[in-house]
Amino acid sequence: MVFDKIKNAVSDLLGGDETVDKAVDQATSSVDDVKDTASKVLSDAKEGGLDADTLKSATSDLGGLADRLKGDAGDLGAIAGNLGDLSALTDVFKDISFPINKDEVIAKLQANGSFNEIVEKLQTVAKERFGDQAELIDTIKGFLTK
């Protein structure tokens, strides 16, 4: 299924992040529920048991599931946007010498000009020094996927 491919790609990038796994699982569940409801309607129609009330109920169920899918897609879209930020950050951080203090990281991000939200969140982090790029990226991943 397409959600499994997305989940695996994102997990490879984020190291199996629970928030990503949960969002993909929710979307997968929503798709499965739509398929189940649609299959039931088709089955009822083939058996001649599709009356107006059944159709109305199924339509209502599918409408609710569609809304749920929109929410799931929004969650996945937000995660995808954060992944793009993370990828761009990796490029910014590749030329940084470690260890580095938090203020120096913030100054680099501000000089880049495109990471204002990350700068704001990083300013609230208690950690004052980062020993290597992995430690810095892990800290940032912690608030990008929340």
Image (cartoon, rainbow, N blue to C red):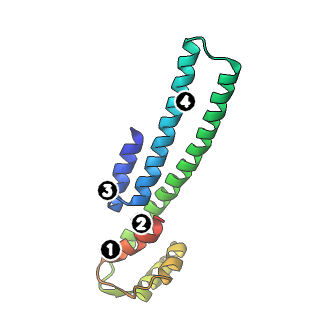
Mark 4 Cα shell of 10 Å, populated few (<14), some (14-19), many (≥20): some
* Between marks 4 and 2 in the image, the one whose residue lies nearer the viewer: 4
Task: Judge the density around disc 2: few (<14), some (14-19), many (≥20) Cα neighbours within 10 Å.
Answer: some
The numbered mark at residue 94 is 1
For disc 3, the neighbor class at 10 Å (few under 14, some 14 to 19, many from 20) is few
Quarter of the image holding residue 135? bottom left
- Tell me residue 89's x, y (percent): 41, 70
Secondary-structure class at tag 1: loop
Q: From this viewpoint, is residue 6 visible?
A: yes
Q: Is residue 111 visible?
A: no
User: Residue 20, relative to residue 73: is it above or below?
Assistant: below
Label ID, residue 12: 3
Nearest the viewer among 109 and 143 is: 143
Labels 1 and 3: the sequence-earlier one: 3
Real-space CA distance between mark 4 and mark 3, rounded to the nearest whole angstrom? 33 Å
Q: Nearer the viewer, residue 86 or 55?
A: 55
Marker disc for residue 86: 2
